[in-house]
Amino acid sequence: MRIALLAIGLVLSLTSGAEAQYLGNYTANPYAGPPAMPQPPGTFSNPYGNSSNSPKLYDSQGSYRGNLNANPYDPNSVANPYGTYGSQYSPNSTNNPYGAGSPYRQDSPTNPYGQGMRVYR
């Protein structure tokens, strides 16, 4: 019984620290807030970034919109021209001017007057 309680306590303590850290908004609007916190050089341009070590992009509805890295081989990267989140033809991509990247959407990173998408680590 005591071991089971210790195991449950350990699991709860490990899962409570796994929350994503909010880094700011990914937007073209210089006045949208809050601004993203300063990041170490190369954070967003990491050519070797993958799902485990890249910042994650989410729209205003909470839908995942890809990894914010420069790896064209990461299947979830916004830089993968053939992936769901990087293709200019995918409706989920910020690179699609008629989809998630439309300059007319309030949560699009390309809308100069919008709020942009949220970035989490």
Image: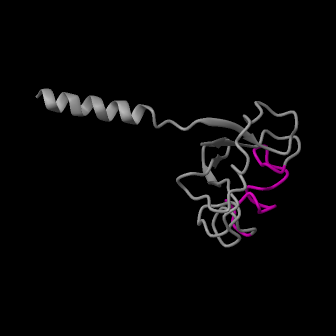
Residue that sits furthest to the front in the current view: 41
Q: In the picture, residue 60 is in which quadrant?
A: top right
Q: Is 35 included in the stretch rendered in magenta?
A: no
**Residue 1 position within the rendered picture, expressed as x and y whole percent measured from the top left:** 11, 28
- Numbered marks: total: 0
Q: In this image, 57 relative to 109: left or right?
A: left
Q: In this figure, which colouring scheme has been used for the structure? A: one colour
**Residue 116 position within the rendered picture, expressed as x and y whole percent measured from the top left:** 76, 43
Q: In this image, 81 relative to 73: left or right?
A: right
Residue that sits furthest to the left in the current view: 1
Residue at point 45%, 33% (across, down): 17
Q: In the picture, residue 5 is in which quadrant?
A: top left
Q: In this image, 52 relative to 46: left or right?
A: left
Q: Is most of the magenta stretch helix, strand or loop?
A: loop
| Nearer to us in this view, 16 or 41 | 41
Residue at point 70%, 43% (across, down): 40
| Nearer to us in this view, 14 or 59 | 14
**Residue 77 position within the rendered picture, expressed as x and y whole percent measured from the top left:** 64, 61
Residue at point 52%, 53% (across, down): 52
**Start-end of magenta stretch:** 89-110
Relative vertical location of residue 41 with respect to residue 115 in this rendering, above or below: below
**Residue 121 position within the rendered picture, expressed as x and y whole percent measured from the top left:** 59, 42
Q: Is 108 included in the stretch rendered in magenta?
A: yes
Residue that sits furthest to the bottom in the current view: 82
| Nearer to us in this view, 23 or 112 | 23
